[in-house]
Amino acid sequence: MISNPYAQKHLEKIVTRPELYSDLYVILGGLERNSISYSIKILEQKLSKLNYSKSLISRAKLVGIELLDNIYKHQEEKSTLNPYFEISLNEDELRFTSANCVSKQAYDFLSKKLAEYSKLTIPELKKEYINQLRDGKLDRKGNAGVGLFSILQRSAQNVEYKLDKVKNGEYYFNFIVKIANVQKN
């Protein structure tokens, strides 16, 4: 039995989805830098072996790195709910699902920014991304705030997200990113 009810529910959905997935990769539990590197290598090797384009592989690696890095950096340390990360592949899409507990401050930031960014067109998003990089502002954790931009751009804004309150000051952030129309070489 999985102790994290959000992960349990998600994993049950995976096995009952009507679409068929040729490959599935799941991490449930705490992340370390080594597990991030290892996960990205597995993704790259699998997509290369399946003969996907270098362009898609690069986009997928960058999205995977951003999602895993966000879990690693922003996981609420005192949370009893383990984070999870999933990559699934079928004929139509490459799907990433990441989820972890975040603080009230992160909840406020994510709610505001995702609502704001989802209204932008791809060219507007790219312009904002460049402005953010040019301004070079870092928060107290050393983040430039470009991770969400990167994910949204590389997925053509094909994302879904949900923030559930776990308890006072703690929220579970579930983020699904899809790279559609996966084409092989």
Image (cartoon, rainbow, N blue to C red):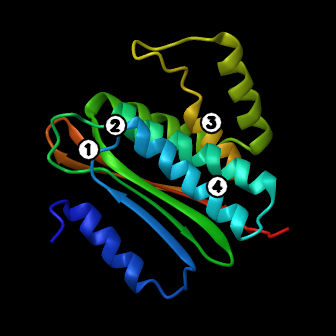
Q: Is 130 placed left or right of 66 in the picture?
A: right
Can residue 120 be spotted in the picture? yes
Residue 57, horizontal then vertical, whole percent: 71, 54
Q: Is 180 placed left or right of 12 in the picture?
A: right
Can residue 158 be spotted in the picture? no
- Residue 184 vertical position relative to residue 166 in the rendered view, above or below: below
Residue 180, horizontal then vertical, whole percent: 69, 65
**For the residues marked 1 and 4, what is the alpha-carbon distance in whole angstroms?**
31 Å
**For the residues marked 2 and 1, what is the alpha-carbon distance in whole angstroms?**
7 Å
**For the residues marked 4 and 3, what is the alpha-carbon distance in whole angstroms?**
22 Å
**Quarter-wise, where is residue 1 in the image?**
bottom left
Q: Secondary structure at mark 4?
A: helix
Residues tagged 4 and 3 counted as in contact (Cβ below 8 A): no
Residue at the disc numbered 4: 44
Mark 2 / mark 4, whichever is N-terminal: 4
Residue 28, horizontal then vertical, whole percent: 31, 57
- Mark 2: amino acid: Tyr
Q: Residue at x 46, y 15 (%)?
A: 142
**Quarter-wise, where is residue 9 in the image?**
bottom left
| Image depth: mark 3 or mark 2 in front | 3
Residue at the disc numbered 3: 149
**For the residues marked 3 and 1, what is the alpha-carbon distance in whole angstroms?**
22 Å
Q: Residue at x 51, y 35 (%)?
A: 113
Residues tagged 2 and 1 counted as in contact (Cβ below 8 A): yes
Mark 4 / mark 3, whichever is N-terminal: 4
Residue at the disc numbered 1: 171
Residue 107 numbered mark, or none: 2
Crowding at dot 4, Cα within 10 Å, few <14 / some 14-19 / many 20+, comes out as: some
Crowding at dot 2, Cα within 10 Å, few <14 / some 14-19 / many 20+, comes out as: many
Q: Quadrant of the C terminus?
A: bottom right
Residues tagged 2 and 4 counted as in contact (Cβ below 8 A): no
